[in-house]
Structures are given as structure tokens and as C-alpha cells.
Amino acid sequence: MTSTTVPRTVDLLLVEDQASDAELALRALRTLDLDERTHRVDDGAEALDFLFGRGAYADRSPADAPGLVLLDLKLPKLSGHEVLRTLKADDRTAHIPVVVLSSSDEQSDVTRCYALGANSYVVKPVDFDTFTETVQRIGTYWLQTNERVGQCPP
Amino acid sequence: MELSHHTSDLDPSSVLGFGSALAMLDSTEEVARLLTGALRSMGLADLQAVVLTNEEDDEPRVFGSAGARALPDSVVDALRQWAPNASADADGSGSPSHHEVEVSPDGCLSEHGIDRLALVRLGTLERDFGTVVAGLAPGTQHTPLQISTLQMMAAQASMALHRIALDQKRAAQEEALRASEARYRELYENAPAAYLSATPDGEIRMANRRATDLFGASESTLVGRTLPKFCADTAAGHEAAERLADHLESGQPVRDDEVKLCLPDGDRIWVSLTMRPVALGDGSAERLVMMVDVTERRRMEVALREARDALETRVEARTAELERANDRLEQQTRRLQALRDIDQAILAAESPKEIATETLRRARQIIPFHRASVSVIDWDAGCAQMLATRQEDSFLEGGTTIPLDDFYLTDTLRAGEPEIIADLANRPLPGAAARVRDIGIRAVLCLPMVVENDLIGLLKIGRTDPDAFAQTDRDVGTELANHLAIALRQARLRERVEDRTTKLERANERLSHQTQRLRALRDIDQAILAAESPEEIAAEAIRRVHDILPYESATVTVTDWDTDTAHVLAARDNVLAAPTTLPLDEVYLSDRLRNGETEVIPDTAYEPVPEAKERIREMGLRSVLCVPMVVEDEVIGVVHVGRTEADAFTDEDRRVGRELADHMAIALRQSQLLEEVQAQRERLEERVQERTAELESFTYSVSHDLRTPLRAIDGYTRILKEDHADQLDDEGQRLLNVVYDSAQTMGNLIDDLLTLSRLGRRDITRAPIDMEALVQDTVDELRRAHPEDATDAFHLAPLPDAMGDRSMIRHVLTNLLSNALKFTRTEDAPRIEVRGERQDDECVYVVADNGVGFDAEQADELFGVFQRGHADDEFEGTGVGLAIVDRIVRRHDGRAWAEGASGDGASFYFALPSAATGTA
């Protein structure tokens, strides 16, 4: 999937280089009808381009921020940690909730992400059922329960 | 009141008769009675009485009658008041007075019919005698004639009373004179002394009874004789007589205590005589002589004097006797004291020679001598040894030995009997005795010294005068010899004991020296063993060896033959300070040292090595002990021990030095080897750590990266099953399941491998763990995770608390309990026990089950990675669980092991250091 099929309204930015994981995640989000409003990028640099309206995403404004960034840590070009640091260091994007979804359950990774400003840290379950349930919970909470900045009710 | 005159008649002749009758009377009572009788007979009163006063103020006496009756007592009492007194005599007329008084109507007089009393005084001008009382009955009255008669009779009675009073007085005076005379006569006669009165011429005039008794002659015989003539007819008697005559003549009072008289019967007595003059009333003079017989007293005195003289004689005799005894006693005491002095000197003396010398120094206090000697006899050697000889005041050198043949020793002496040689002259004598004679000794007292029947020697005492010794000298000498013998015997015993003691002490000293050396060497060994570096070894060794090998300076140097340097490992009191490295040619290293031989060298030996010589000079060392340290025929260094005295090292010092160097050589070599091993080990460890880190990092990333494809396999398999099941036949479904299960297994495997790898990196945080609670938690969790299992299989016993990392220990428990659960699943009555107890310094816990168990031979392999006790399809598992258990327990410094048998259950143990030691 590429930027060519960017939905008009992006609620969730899924940063995931593994196609299988991305597909499984989208499949889980489908139940919540969130798959249509999810945009997936497969490396860190693209994620930042999307968020700051640069490169291929020059037509986008940083003001059109997604309601949630679901961020993997092991990414080509730019690691998830760098994405997190840049994103949280910029006033325009700092408010965007970032949930780290990583295979790593290393305490060092967890500590580091929170230090960089991650809003949540979730270990990717290996088991399919658990994985599906976890992703759904994240979507439910952050996009349907959590109140985001600057979103005026229609 | 009308009064009638008294009716009695008055006869003047009876009045005259009354006067002449009065003249016949010589007592007042008779006068009173005559008067009252006259009053009654003349009818002058109805009651008549005379009250007479008494000169001695006694009660007045009352005489009288009422008519012919005697006066009752009450009337007598009533009449007494009419005795004349001062008031009655107040008119002072002195003439017989008459007056009348009325009596009290209720008095006793009135009862007797009297109502008035006519009172007439009896008395002279000088004194009152009494009162005449005439009681009158009522109606009667005295005529003037009667009154005159009364007064006249009273006057006559008064005169008679006066005459009687005068007569009585005279008679009393005469009687008193008679009594006085008689008393004096009696006194004179009965005086306890003999009294004589004599004229100034000495003529005896009177003699009392004692005097006549004294003289044994009647007074008449004595009177008229001349007193001085009674004095004895001796010279003294004549003198006494003359003296007495003179005094009698002159009247000068005299007392002569001892006058011997010759009595008329020829007896002679001694008297004490006192003479004094007496003036008689007629103007003549007499001499009163008093004599007391003192014959008996004189006799007693003489006897007393004689007795006293006898007593004095006896006392003197006795005193002399006592003094002699005292002298003897003193002499004996002196001797005893001298003996005691000798004894004390002997006791203080330390050798037989000294004992003998001290004895001779003092023996003169007991027995004077010119020459004396003390010798002891050595029967075995057949000779006598002179212990001490004193000649006059000088002591001759002792120690001379005289053969017994040459020595004066008779059978008497051999038998222990003392012997007196009265005179050495003119008799055959053995050599030694002859020499004594030659220097002028004539008499010799030979005293054997005997102890327990053995003759041990002789005390010989010599004098220049022949026959000089008496029996007492012999006795005293014997005693002295006895004392000397005992002392010598004691000294000999003491010497023997001292000798033995000295030998023992020497042996003891050698032993203790050796022990000290060994102990010091052992201490050095221990210190060396505890030391961690060659420098420390060397420093400890030379520090401690100082006790057994004293020195002023010491160094330990190791040689490096490759670089030709010497390295000073340790130095004490040396100008070199350790560690220092020197070129070898600045160190004294002779060929002998290079060959491993010990050397003791003087400071001069350092000449060829100027640097070393300078150091030795600076420290002032005069001798140095050099001991090479040799290991396997190679000299690895030298121990130098220096002293400031020349030639100061003994063989013993060399031995100690040698031993020290040997021990140190071995220790240094060991230390060297140890350092090499240590370095090797450190290198290895470093490499192991590097490799381990590499490996762990690899494992981590691999496990990590494996998860993603695994999740894909799992996820897509599920999607396939859920969304496309209808497109797969049964075989397709089965194959899909196999893929799915494999993915599950692989997931667990990756988790376990990650855990294992993480354990290698994670730090342990130790804290006390409530094991009972932790086990309960774990069990609860397992029950939740595996509700399908028979979770009532668990039986938990009380457990001791552990010290460790709680989450890690929890991991251990989880693995062991889930294992147990897994392997009991096939049992009908699964049972899983958790027990624990404290053993010594660790806590041992066990999870025991009654499951399928394992082959006992596998027990040790079970804890390896990927070791599985059972086939895959029998019991699921990755083969990493027990490896994790083992890893965690080991990281806690504990151990894990298993016991079991195939089909017979399994017990998995793990032991952790107990809380007390695990807190570090």
C-alpha cells in the first residue's frame, strides 16, 4: 500500500514495515470500521513526511493530524524511536497520541519509548486472537473513547 | 457570903512541939507529912496538902489528906497548880504570904466539899520550896490566929526545909570526893605500866601493883630503897644508874628505852624507863617513874635479828649459786647463738666450701683455736678434700686433696666418735698431721661429721698449748660438727638438684628455642600463604623472621637473569626502599651465591661492588648473611640479613636463614604461577564475556525477528481456517492445523529462549521472599491458566522464607509447577507437593509429583537447553524450562537438581543461600 490511496480523512496512521502485521492489524480494525480511515506507511521517513506534509505528502497540512499513530519500532530508513522523538519534539505534532506496538518486550525499549513521550506501549501478541483483540482495544480506546485535541464536534 | 470560923482549936504548945519535931527531920517528905499532919490535927483545914517544888523542874510533888483519907489522884493533879512560880512570887516580898482563892464550883475539889483554898508560901528569901494548901468547906473561915499559926508553921517548915537542903548538898560533896579518890587510886593501881614515885634522892616512896609485880616484891619491900641501885651491875648498868640518879636529882624529864635491871630475886630484866618530876601540894617535889618491861620485846628482837642474819646468809649463798647457774646459762646461750649464727651463715652459703669457710669464721665463738680445718672424705677416690682451713686469722686456700693414707683418721673417728689428741708431740703421725705439728699445734680436737651413719668428713680444731681441750669442748665441737655435716649433706644434695635442674633447663631451653623457631616459621608460612603478591610475601617474611633471626637490616631481592636486573621486593631498616630495581652489577652476587650456597660475609667482602659497599657502610653493617632462594636449581633471588657486629651469625642463624629462604622461594614461585594463572583466567573470562554478549545479542535479535513471521503464520492460518474453511477438504484442514500447532510451539520456544537470554543480562535484586505466599500465587495463576487440569493436585507444606529476586524465583516456581502439572496429567490421582526446609546455611525447596517421572540416568541432563525427557507428541514443551530454572538458581548462588525414576514421579529441588548469607 502506498500514499496513492490516502483516504480523505485519516484517523489512524499505522507505521508498520511488515506487510503481514499490517494486514492483520487492518483486519482487526475492520470490525470497528476503522480500516477505511487508516493510512499505513512502511518506513519511518514516510511516517514523518505524512505527518508534516512533506515529500509525497506535500498536499497535506500538519493540521490534519491523525487521531492516533500506531508505531512499530523496527523500521527501515528511520527507526520508530526517531519517529517518536521528532514527532514529540515538534509543537505541531506533539499532541498526537502515539501507541508503540512492538514485538519487543525488552524493558529498555519500554523505558526509552516512554522517555521519548510515547502515550502507550503495547507488546505485539504472537497469538492471532490476542493480537486481534489487542489492536481492537487500542482502536476503541484511542479513537472512540479518548478525546483528541482540536477536534470540534460536527 | 456568911462565913463561920473554923471550929478546930489551936494549941500554941502543939505549934512549939511542931518546931522541935521539925528539927528532928532530915528529909523534905517527912517535913511535908509532919506539916499536913499538924494542919489536920490542929483543925486548920478540911483538906490539907503541901505542894513541894523540885529543883530539877520535875512535877511538883503533892502530900496531904482530906480528913483522914488520902487525896485522890484527881485532887493531887488539881493541887499541883498551886506550886509557887514566878507569878505567885511577883510581889517579891519574900515573906510567907497568905491568900485565899475560891475553887471552881464544878472542879474535883468542889466535889470533895471544898469551896476555898487558903494558900501559904514555903520558902526562903533565895528560893521557893512549895506551898501549904488548906482547903475549907463552905461556910468555914480562918480566924486571924489561925492564919498566923498557918504562917508560923509555914515559916518553921521553910527553915527546916532550908536546913535539909544544905545538909543534903554537903553530903553529896563529901561523897563525890570519896568517889574521886577511889577512882584515882584504882587508875594508879591498875595502870598498864609500872609506876613508882621517888624522892629526888632516888628513894622509892610508892609503887603501884604493876610495879610490885615487875619487881616481884611487895610495896613495903620497895619503899625506902634507892631506885638507881636496881640497875644491873655491869658497865652499861652503872652508866644507866648514874644517868638515872642525875636526872632524878635534877628533875629533868628523861626517857631511857633500854635499862637493864637486877631484881631483888636476882632476875634481870630490860625496861623502858620514863621519869618526870611531880610537884606535890605541900611544896615538896617527887619524881614519877614509869617502867615498861621490854625484856620479851628485846628477846624477840634479838631472835628476829638472828633469824634475819641467817636468812641473809642463805640468800647470799643462793644468789651466788644462781649467778653461777646464770653464767653457765649465758655461756650456753652464747654457744647456742654462735651455733645459730653458724647455721644461718651455712644456710646462706651456696657451696660446701663456702659452708666450711663460714663455719670456721664463726667457730671461735664456741671453741677458741689456733688452727681449724674442714675436710670431706671421698671414699671412692680414697682421699680427703680440704674444704677450708683457718690458721690464726687467715684462711688458707681450700681444695687441697690428701690421700687417706696421709690423713689422720683413726678407727675411733671412722666409728663416728670424736677424739681428743692431748699432745701431738712425741707420737708418730701421718704426713698431714705432722705438718700441723710442725707449725706449732699441740692439742687437736678431731670431730667426725656423720650423716646417716656415713662418715662424710672431719672437723679438726687445734691449739698450740697441749691438753687444751676439755670435755665441754668435745661436746660443743660434736654439736658443731653435726650441724656442719647436715649442712654439707644438704649442700651436696642441692648441688645435685641444681645440676639436674640446669641440665633440664638447658634441654628445655633448646626445646623451647626450637619450638619458637618452628612456630615462627609456621607463622611466616601462614603469612606468606595469606599474602597476595611477591612484595607482600617478602615483606611479611622478613618482618616476622626478626623474632628468631634478629637483624639490623634485611632485604629480599629477586633476580631477573634475562634483563640482568635485581628487583628489591622488600626491605627493612635498609637504605633501599622496596620496590626498587637495580642493575645486577650493583648487587653483591658471588659465584657461591649464584650456585645456591649460603654465605656469611664481612663488610669487607663488598669491596668489588662499590654501590653495595656504600650501602653497607652507610648502615654500619659489619656482617651479612646472604641466602639464595633456589627453585628447581635456579637462583631466583637472595635474602640479605645484616648485623652491626662483625662475625655475628651462628650456624643456627644460617639454618634459620636457609629455611626462610627456601620457604620464600617456594612461595614466590607459587605466587608467580598464581599470577600467571590469574592473568590467564582473566583473559579467558573476558573472552567468554565477549562471546556471551555476542551470543545473547544474537539470540535476542533472532528471537525477536522470528516473532513477526510467526505471527504471520499464526494469523494467516487462522484467517484461512475462519474465512476459507469451506474451500479446504479434511486433509487440507489437518495440514492447516499442523501449521497452526507448529507456530504455537515455535512461539513458546522463542519466549523461553528470550527469557533465558535475558537472564544472562539482568541484574538480580535480592530481597526477602515470603515463599509460601509466592507459591500460593503461582498455583492460583496456574489454576486460572489451566482450568481444565486437576488443580486440586497441589499440596503445599510450610516453607521457609527465601532471599532472592522475587520475579526470577517466581519464574522458577512457575516452570517447576507447570512441569509437574504437565507430567501428572495422565495420572488418575495427580499429586503435587511443595515442601521446603532450612538446612545449615541454605533453604532447600522441592516440587515433587507422582507423574510419569524420568529415567534416573537423565537426571543431570534435564537442566540443559533443549533437553527433553519425553517425546514431542507425548508432552508439549520447548526443553528450555529447566534450563531457565537452573540458570536462575545458579545466578542466586544456589543449585538445582532432580530425583526420579521412570514412571515413578519426579522431585525437582532447588537450594538458595539462606536469608542470613544472601543479604550481601
Image (tube, coloured by chain):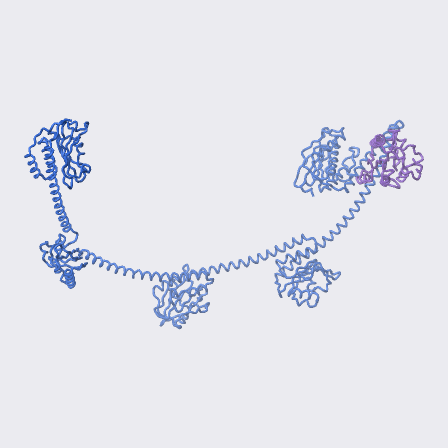
Residue that extends furthest to the left in the rendered view of this protein: B13
Looking at the picture, tell me which residue is in the foreground, B694 or B374.
B694
Looking at the picture, tell me which residue is in the foreground, B808 or B870.
B808
> Residue B611's spot in the image, x, y percent?
70, 65
Which residue is pictured at 80% across the width and 33% down the height?
B873
- Res B676 visible: yes
> Residue B264's spot in the image, x, y percent?
11, 57
> Residue A106's spot in the image, x, y percent?
80, 39
| Label total for image | 0
| Res B693 → quadrant | top right
> Residue B524's spot in the image, x, y percent?
64, 55
| Res B124 → quadrant | top left
Looking at the picture, tell me which residue is in the foreground, B366 or B838.
B366
Chain A's colour is purple
Residue B242, placed above or below residue A112: below
Which chain does the blue colour mark? Answer: B
| Res B555 → quadrant | bottom right
- Res B383 visible: no
Looking at the picture, tell me which residue is in the foreground, B410 or B34.
B34
